[in-house]
Image (spheres, grey):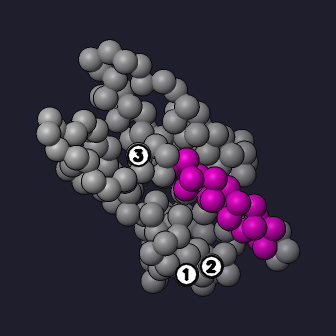
Amino acid sequence: MTPRSRTNQLLYQAELLLTLPAGDDEHAQARRMALEEGSLALAELALQSMLRDVTELANLERHEWRELLGPQGAGIAELHRLRELAARPDSWLAWLIGKLEALHGNDGVARRTTGAAQGLIAVGSSAALGDELQTCLAEAKAEIAALRETSEEW
């Protein structure tokens, strides 16, 4: 399988997990959290694969996303573009990196949803992790297409 095919496969699988129903039994919240964190883990694998995909011609020895997107990463145009994107707090990549860091932490990233306590009014509307991840994956796919085009020009 080529890096391009693997990236596409992982993105598809991450999206597919988010479409699975969590159910409505006593395990629904745990199942939803597992689906969200599983999808996020696949998104990390897709990020790694995408970096291999768009830097394939550079013949890099390593493709660890923390290294390539860090300040000491290779001086390849596609990586420079991604580093700039990661530095923008409102970008899909900055969001993804933040969630990946949380995923690897002790607390994880998925959260239980709690209904408003009796007599309290829920304030604020934080989007569900799954919804945010779906948006992130859609934006990532658009970015990957542009990066592949740039990579092929070289």
Amino acid residing under circle 1: Glu
Kindly indicate whether the residue at mark 1 contacts the one at mark 2 (C-beta within 8 angstroms).
yes
**Region in magenta:** 133-151
Does the magenta segment cover residue 95?
Answer: no
Kindly indicate whether the residue at mark 3 contacts the one at mark 1 (C-beta within 8 angstroms).
no
- Using the image as rendered, state which of residue 34 and residue 132 is in the foreground: 132
- Of mark 1 and mark 3, the one earlier in the sequence is 1
The residue positioned 78% from the left and 73% from the top of the image is 150
Amino acid residing under circle 3: Ala
- Using the image as rendered, state which of residue 111 and residue 17 is in the foreground: 111
The residue positioned 49% from the left and 72% from the top of the image is 90
- Compared with residue 77, is residue 129 higher up or lower down, i.e. above or below? above
SS class, disc 1:
helix
The residue sitting at the top extreme is: 25
**Residue underneath mark 1:** 84
The residue sitting at the front extreme is: 119
Circle 1 Cα neighbour tier, 10 Å, few/some/many (<14 / 14–19 / ≥20): few
**Residue underneath mark 2:** 81
- Compared with residue 121, is residue 89 higher up or lower down, i.e. above or below? below
Compute the Cα span from label 2 to label 3.
Answer: 28 Å
Predominant secondary structure in magenta? helix
- Using the image as rendered, state which of residue 128 and residue 86 is in the foreground: 128
Compute the Cα span from label 1 to label 3.
Answer: 26 Å
| Residue 51 can be seen, yes or no | yes
Residue 142 picture location, percent across and down:
70, 60
Circle 2 Cα neighbour tier, 10 Å, few/some/many (<14 / 14–19 / ≥20): few
**Residue underneath mark 3:** 128
- Of mark 2 and mark 3, the one earlier in the sequence is 2
Determine whether, in the image, residue 42 is placed left or right of residue 114.
Answer: right
